[in-house]
Image (spheres, rainbow, N blue to C red):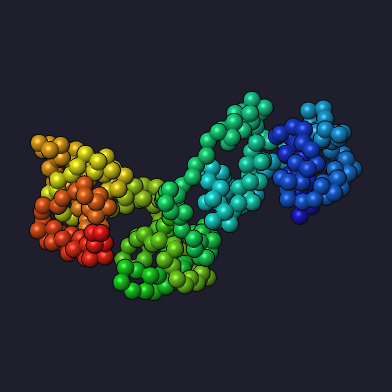
């Protein structure tokens, strides 16, 4: 809408000072000719804008107080440092507008500090080798969370697809992946949004659970997950190179257990380390190549022997 754009022009000039027509056009994604027409409209409305060959600026220290946030902009405030997450939730424009209004409302000294922070610090949530989740249902899920609407979903579980009726309490972004915390049947559970195959937002609403704290629930969920993560242990010999790789490939708990192991005469370390399932442990130890030798349990060693034997047929010596 043109009124929104005119207000944005005033806030941009107020927060950033002199700007050229081209800079304004780029910022607002319109043509330079549109900016020229908008400047005439602002002058007609009594906004003291001065323009010359070097650009436009507000005169006489003009300050607008029209910085109130819309509902969507207020919703997006928590995501002002996560533009990617805001875009995923359909709030990119609202977050950008909220940032602009907040910057315009700040005193000059604080505005300069905020600008410097934005220029020099950036948070990129996904990991190096993963771009994060994509889901056609994320926006709808976020809206249902906000409006407390019940969801009917078809969800891809570990073994099969299941139908669930969910009361969505909140969304969590972890390592680039979106998780929905929702009440489902017997209690509060966690669902990965990208594994929702079908979704219907029902007209039915639900009451927000008294005393529920999303951040506290998530901390407890992570602690419980880590407790259940390692169900067994393995006795392994690890080379110095493998010890350096452990924190990056198998996590801090495994690396700490290996560091407490018994040094061997050949420079390797003998250690008992926690493992998940043997299937998972097999994949993880194979990543260490010839830097790891599993001694126990025998069943895990047998799995590795069989896999390595198969690999040797695929890669026979020249």
**Left or right: 154 in relation to 313:** right
**Left or right: 67 in relation to 196:** right
Residue 143 image point, x, y percent: 54, 60
Q: Nearer the viewer, residue 45 or 208?
A: 45
**Left or right: 6 in relation to 81:** right
For the view shown, which residue lies furthest in the top direction? 109
Name the quadrant of the C terminus.
bottom left
Q: Residue at x 31, y 68 (%)?
A: 158
Q: Residue at x 20, y 60 (%)?
A: 308
Residue 52 image point, x, y percent: 87, 33
Q: Quadrant of residue 104?
A: top right
Q: Nearer the viewer, residue 236 or 290?
A: 290
Q: Is residue 271 above or below residue 141?
A: above
For the view shown, which residue lies furthest in the front direction? 318
How many discs mark residues in the rendered view?
A: 0
Q: Quadrant of residue 315?
A: bottom left
Q: Is residue 220 above or below residue 15?
A: below
Residue 242 image point, x, y percent: 24, 43
On the question of residue 22 being in view, the answer is yes
Name the quadrant of the N terminus.
bottom right
Q: Residue at x 35, y 61 (%)?
A: 189
Q: Nearer the viewer, residue 27 or 72?
A: 27
Q: Is residue 291 above or below residue 279?
A: above
On the question of residue 4 being in view, the answer is no
Residue 203 image point, x, y percent: 52, 70
Q: Is residue 104 above or below residue 162?
A: above
Q: Residue at x 31, y 50 (%)?
A: 222
């Amino acid at each position: 809408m043109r009124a929104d754009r005119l207000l944005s022009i005033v806030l941009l000039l107020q927060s950033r000072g002199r700007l050229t027509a081209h800079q304004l056009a780029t910022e607002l994604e319109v043509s330079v000719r549109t900016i020229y027409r908008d400047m005439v409209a602002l002058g007609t409305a009594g906004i003291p804008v001065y323009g010359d060959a070097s650009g436009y600026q507000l005169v006489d220290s003009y300050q607008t107080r029209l910085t109130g946030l819309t509902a969507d902009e207020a919703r997006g405030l928590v995501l002002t440092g996560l533009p990617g997450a805001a875009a995923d939730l359909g709030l990119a424009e609202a977050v950008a507008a909220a940032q602009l209004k907040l910057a315009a409302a700040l005193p000059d000294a604080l505005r300069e500090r905020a600008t410097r922070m934005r220029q020099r610090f950036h948070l990129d949530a996904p990991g190096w080798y993963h771009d994060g989740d994509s889901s056609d249902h994320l926006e709808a899920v976020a809206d249902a969370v906000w409006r407390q609407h019940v969801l009917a979903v078809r969800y891809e579980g570990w073994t099969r697809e299941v139908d669930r009726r969910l009361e969505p309490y909140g969304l969590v972004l972890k390592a680039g992946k979106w998780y929905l915390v929702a009440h489902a049947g017997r209690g509060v559970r966690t669902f990965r949004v990208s594994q929702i195959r079908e979704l219907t937002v029902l007209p039915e609403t639900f009451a927000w659970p008294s005393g529920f704290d999303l951040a506290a629930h998530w901390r407890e969920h992570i602690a419980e997950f880590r407790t259940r993560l390692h169900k067994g242990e393995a006795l392994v010999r690890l080379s110095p190179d493998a010890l350096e790789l452990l924190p990056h490939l198998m996590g801090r708990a495994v690396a700490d257990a290996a560091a407490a192991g018994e040094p061997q005469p050949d420079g390797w370390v003998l250690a008992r380390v926690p493992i998940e399932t043997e299937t998972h442990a097999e994949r993880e130890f194979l990543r260490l190549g010839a830097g790891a030798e599993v001694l126990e349990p025998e069943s895990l060693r047998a799995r590795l022997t069989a896999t390595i034997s198969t690999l040797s047929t695929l890669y026979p010596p020249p």
